[in-house]
């Protein structure tokens, strides 16, 4: 079963800046001092009763809507796929913190993603995509930079999987070297690189190849 999705997505995993909190100090007016003979009594401290709270039960996550929304997913005979938006992609990358080594590539290389699901069990998934860039000779056209083949493991029926498509195509180039110091300047972003022409294939038979994987083949 195969699905072809033509939307292109590429993003660098840049950390989202945390909002800073400012504390405004307000001047508290000083009380006016009065001279008065008073008898000071010690305040009576009432003991508060300890309230034992019952342990809160975890709130179960709602079951995913099934079948997937046809306005968001492309479908083909029980197989569904959706390309997340750039913001969703950054969220997916952030959620994959356990895959630090792989996800770190998305800071410097072109990455994409696809969300897949199926009515039936898929022994493994094969995702094919293309990495393209702006034609250096004609900015109105695009050129193929390389092909990416991504694999993902077993997925149960009516279950969603977020699959990262991690290429080896750089999205920036080294900055100019300062002749006086020999130190390279900041990396220069390469605009217009994207991951698209995505096809998601659900395989019902087992495979002997190593899964998961991201195999990038440049065409230059």
Image (cartoon, helix red, strand yellow):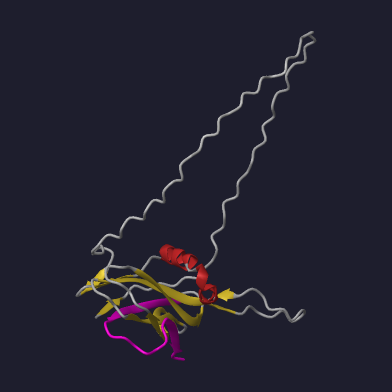
Rendering coords of residue 54 (x, y %): 46, 42
Rendering coords of residue 159 (x, y %): 31, 68
Is 160 colored magenta in this rendering? no
Asked whether, in this view, residue 35 is left or right of residue 172, the answer is right
Rendering coords of residue 194 (x, y %): 43, 76
Residue at 60% x, 50% y is: 20
Residue at 69% x, 19% y is: 43
Q: Is residue 142 visible?
A: no
Is 218 colored magenta in this rendering? yes
- Picture layout, residue 191 above or below residue 207: above
Asked whether, in this view, residue 180 is left or right of residue 191, the answer is right
Q: In the image, which residues are magenta?
A: 193-220
Asked whether, in this view, residue 107 is left or right of residue 117, the answer is right
Residue at 80% x, 10% y is: 35
Number of numbered discs present? Answer: 0
Seen from this angle, which residue lies furthest left?
Answer: 77
Seen from this angle, which residue lies furthest top?
Answer: 37
Which is more toward the observer, 144 or 126? 126
């Amino acid at each position: 079963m195969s699905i072809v999705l033509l939307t292109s997505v590429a993003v660098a995993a840049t950390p989202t800046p945390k909002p800073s909190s400012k504390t405004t100090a307000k001047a508290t007016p000083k009380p006016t001092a009065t001279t008065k003979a008073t008898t000071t009594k010690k305040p009576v401290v009432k003991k508060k009763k300890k309230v034992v709270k019952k342990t809160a039960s975890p709130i179960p996550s709602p079951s995913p809507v099934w079948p997937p929304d046809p306005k968001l997913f492309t479908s083909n005979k029980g197989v569904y796929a959706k390309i997340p938006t750039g913001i969703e992609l950054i969220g997916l990358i952030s959620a994959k913190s356990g895959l630090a080594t792989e996800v770190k590539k998305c800071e410097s290389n072109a990455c994409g993603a696809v969300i897949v699901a199926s009515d039936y069990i898929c022994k493994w998934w094969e995702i094919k995509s293309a990495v393209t860039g702006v034609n250096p000779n004609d900015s109105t056209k695009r050129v193929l930079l390389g092909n990416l083949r991504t694999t993902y493991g077993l997925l149960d029926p009516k279950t969603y999987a977020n699959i990262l498509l991690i290429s080896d195509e750089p999205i920036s180039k080294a900055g100019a070297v300062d002749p006086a110091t020999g130190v390279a300047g900041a990396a220069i972003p390469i605009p217009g690189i994207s991951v698209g022409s995505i096809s998601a294939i659900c395989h019902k038979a087992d495979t002997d190849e190593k899964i998961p994987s991201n195999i990038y083949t440049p065409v230059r």
